[in-house]
Image: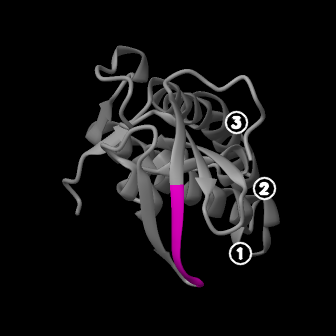
Amino acid sequence: MADEKNYITPQGHAALEAEFNELLKVERPALVKVVSWAAGNGDRSENGDYIYGKRRLRQIDGRLRFLMQRMDLAVVVDPATQQGLEKVFFGAWVTLFSLKDDVEHTYRIVGKDELEPSLGYISWVSPLARAMLGKQIGDIVKVTAPVGEEEYEIIDVQYQPPLTSVT
């Protein structure tokens, strides 16, 4: 799966770039200064600033490599340019009505790097998102969950954030 496309919204891509730039241009250079200073203080084996700094540099470098790979694979999909707005596609805000417990849920279908369940952001590869893709208002979506099969009716599809709060 190393070559799998990384579909992402423009906002998600901007967030990856912002994190990359913060690590590369701010956090890493500051940490290099601390490690250099600590290295000049003599015995490195018992020097906490040096040991912690080197460990943190490895973590930052690993994260930078990861972010670079994700951005290289990124395919930015702008929901604002989506055609066929009555159907559920990547970037859509979808409001579902649970046929089991009569509750509405609103989700946004986003890239794997944009997950934020507290905001209702779900990955396009999740079972729920896959079940919704290509459907439209009035369609019934069936999803197998750990507690059994769940059924939802799609009651709204938008490509702009809904005016109501996300649940």
Q: Earlier in the sequence, mark 1 or mark 3?
A: 3
Image coordinates of residue 61 in percent, x first then y, are 49, 51
Q: Which residue is mark 1?
A: 45
Q: Is residue 53 left or right of residue 68?
A: right
Q: Which residue is mark 3?
A: 30
Q: Residue at x 71, y 59 (%)?
A: 102
Is 162 rendered above or below residue 95?
Answer: above
Q: Nearer the viewer, mark 1 or mark 3?
A: 3
Please tell me which residue lies in front, 5 or 79: 79
Q: Residue at x 72, y 51 (%)?
A: 40
Image coordinates of residue 54 in percent, x first then y, are 62, 59
Farthest-out residue, top: 81
Q: Is residue 133 left or right of residue 148?
A: left
- How far is mark 1 from mark 3, CA to CA? 22 Å
Q: Quadrant of the N terminus?
A: bottom left
Q: Is residue 84 left or right of residue 41?
A: left
Please tell me which residue lies in front, 57 or 86: 86
Indicate the amino acid at tag 3.
Answer: Ala
Is 159 rendered above or below residue 117?
Answer: above
Is 162 rendered above or below residue 53?
Answer: above
Please tell me which residue lies in front, 18 or 155: 155
Taking the magenta stretch, the answer to whether it contains residue 27 is: no
Image coordinates of residue 130 in percent, x first then y, are 36, 56
- How far is mark 1 from mark 2, CA to CA? 11 Å
Q: Which residue is mark 2?
A: 41
Q: Residues within 10 Å of mark 1 (few under 14, many from 20)?
A: few
Span shown in magenta: 147-152
Q: Residue at x 69, y 55 (%)?
A: 39
